[in-house]
Image (spheres, rainbow, N blue to C red):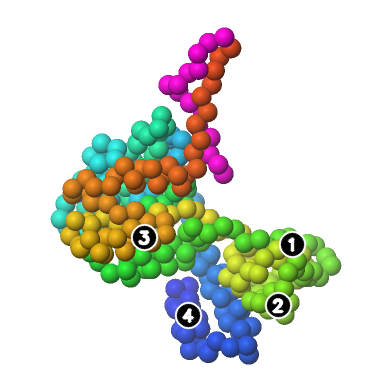
Amino acid sequence: MGIIERIKEIEAEMARTQKNKATEYHLGQLKAKIAKLRTQLLEPPKGSSGGGDGFEVTKFGHGRVALIGFPSVGKSTLLTMLTGTHSEAASYEFTTLTCIPGIIHYNDTKIQLLDLPGIIEGASEGKGRGRQVIAVAKSSDLVLMVLDASKSEGHRQILTKELEAVGLRLNKRPPQIYFKKKKTGGISFNSTLPLTHVDEKLCYQILHEYKIHNAEVLFREDATVDDLIDVIEGNRKYIKCVYVYNKIDVIGIDDVDKLARQPNSVVISCNLKLNLDRLLSKMWEEMGLVRVYTKPQGQQPDFSDPVVLSAV
């Protein structure tokens, strides 16, 4: 049985299992098994040199932003609008087949914008060019999830699920859990506050699933089982994401207002060039870039070429 089949089998078992106090330990173990299998799925095949048919894009500028979304939602048009770089756009799906970079000049800084091929459901399992697209997203400072405002809200959930399946955590911060493997001494479990989602027995079972028998675990917040697994895995990427709803010119004003009020969301229309300035200011705000203008001694400050620092 392949890794994908095993993952689906465990997911089916989790769906069948009732969630209550008696089954929480069993569900915790199943979640740990799925996390281990997903990590194996991302590893290159044994015997390969590690090289693959990924997207070779050199990092340039003061930050990198990746455009992610389903096919034909307007990613290529948005890249052309913001950077002037031509990315082929057409009325059929999968017009973009590779990664096309462009540069946004904004507030005296250069921000690299990457137009990636559209990803489909099952991308985390390798469908389409999903793995390569997600690998580039992991190396970005910000993800712009481009969505079609006229389509159902389900697209956002599907994309978020695909990205979370490969270890990307959107608009979340790392859990306040201290974890360190030791050579001897068994497992030391402590917390600085009462825990409602995880207890000592569940923590031991999850560590046992990873064949860890000597470790120090300290909870500094009321974290969940998923948070504990993320810390043990240690390969999660916490990244900011802005949800960009394109094609607002084809829906009613009430729907536009509803989408615009959602957190981390911006509504735009590439066709009518609406609200692109708000999108740029939101990108700037989320990336947390700071400009420092240097002043040579005895001279006027140089306002043409700032030193750009990031908040992280």
Which secondary structure lies at badge 1? Answer: strand
Query: Which residue is at 59% across, 64% downward?
Result: 230
Quadrant in the rendering for residue 29? bottom right
Q: In this image, 226 relative to 2: left or right?
A: right
Q: Is residue 220 above or below residue 282?
A: below
CB within 8 Å, label 1 to label 3: no
Q: Nearer the viewer, mark 3 or mark 4?
A: 3
What is the residue that sits farthest to the left in this orientation?
91
The answer to which of marks 3 and 4 sits earlier in the sequence is 4
Foreground label between 1 and 2 = 2
Identify which amino acid the numbered label 1 is placed on. Answer: Lys
| Residue located beneath label 4 in the image | 11
Q: Amino acid type of disc 2?
A: Asp
Part of the protein shown in magenta: 298-312
Q: Earlier in the sequence, mark 1 or mark 2?
A: 1
Q: State yes or no: discs 1 and 4 in contact (Cβ < 8 Å).
A: no
Read off the residue under disc 2: 199
Q: Residue at x 49, y 58 (%)?
A: 171
Which numbered mark, 4 or 2, is in the foreground of this view?
Answer: 2
Q: Which residue type carries mark 3? A: Arg
Distance from disc 1 to disc 4, alpha carbons, whole Å, reads 29 Å
- Residue beneath disc 3: 261
Q: How far across and down, in percent of the image, does residue 275 sit?
A: 28, 47
Q: Is residue 300 magenta?
A: yes
Task: Report the amino acid beneath label 4.
Answer: Glu
Query: Residue 73 in the image: x percent, y percent?
Result: 25, 57
Circle nearer the viewer, 1 or 3:
3
Marks 1 and 2: CB-CB under 8 Å?
A: no
Look at the numbered discs 3 and 2 and tell me whether their residues touch, using CB distance below 8 Å: no
* Residue bearing mark 1: 181
The image position of residue 26, as x and y in percent, is: 61, 84
Q: Earlier in the sequence, mark 1 or mark 4?
A: 4
